[in-house]
Amino acid sequence: MKRCLWLLVAVALLPCIAQAEENPYTVAYYYRVKWGFQQEYERLFMKNHYPVLAADMKQGLIRNVHLFRPTFHGDGRADWTFLVVISYASWQALGVQRDEAVVKRLYPDQATFEKEERRRFEILDAHWDIPLTPVKPPE
């Protein structure tokens, strides 16, 4: 009896779950780069990571990517110096394993690519990913 009830509930919720998986899903990626290394970080990001994101956009996994740096300094406690906001096609697209063949095609010199990616993370003070849940205002 309990199994039938759980099965009934699962079947009833299936359309809601499917709809949630089909909706775009946005994540904000904050980076705090060590003092004096901002230009190097952005150069490495644009050279080695942005083309991979662009390939994901072509594939349809990502709808858009927005890049930001703050215009002014903040209070200094938890400042971010680079922000990447990615809208994925769906919650499922967020978890799709990247096709390594794409990375190898974009960067045939894998040793240099890996060295520069290590460097990109060495010059960070902090990095945090914030999945965003939309809030609907009252009508």
Image (cartoon, rainbow, N blue to C red):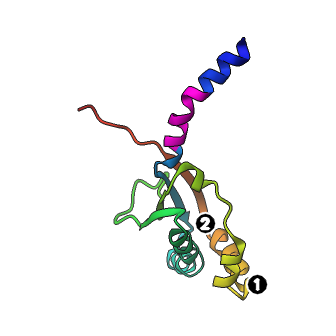
| Most frequent secondary structure within the magenta stretch | helix
Q: Is residue 103 left or right of residue 53?
A: right
The amino acid sitting under disc 1 is Ala
**Residue at horizontal 71 percent and vertical 73 percent from the top:** 100
- Measured as percent of width and height from the top left, residue 135 is found at 38, 38
The amino acid sitting under disc 2 is Leu
Task: Give above or below for 90 relative to 33.
Answer: above
| Quadrant occupied by the N terminus | top right
Is disc 2 placed on a helix, strand or loop? strand
Nearest the camera: 125 or 64? 64
| Region in magenta | 11-20
Q: Earlier in the sequence, mark 1 or mark 2?
A: 1
Q: Is residue 7 left or right of residue 90?
A: right
What residue is disc 1 on? 111
**Residue at horizontal 39 percent and vertical 64 percent from the top:** 70
How many callouts does the rendering have? 2
Quarter of the rendering containing residue 97: bottom right
What residue is disc 2 on? 124
Is disc 1 placed on a helix, strand or loop? helix
Quarter of the rendering containing residue 7: top right
Q: Is residue 83 visible?
A: no
**Residue at horizontal 23 percent and vertical 32 percent from the top:** 139
Q: Is residue 136 visible?
A: yes
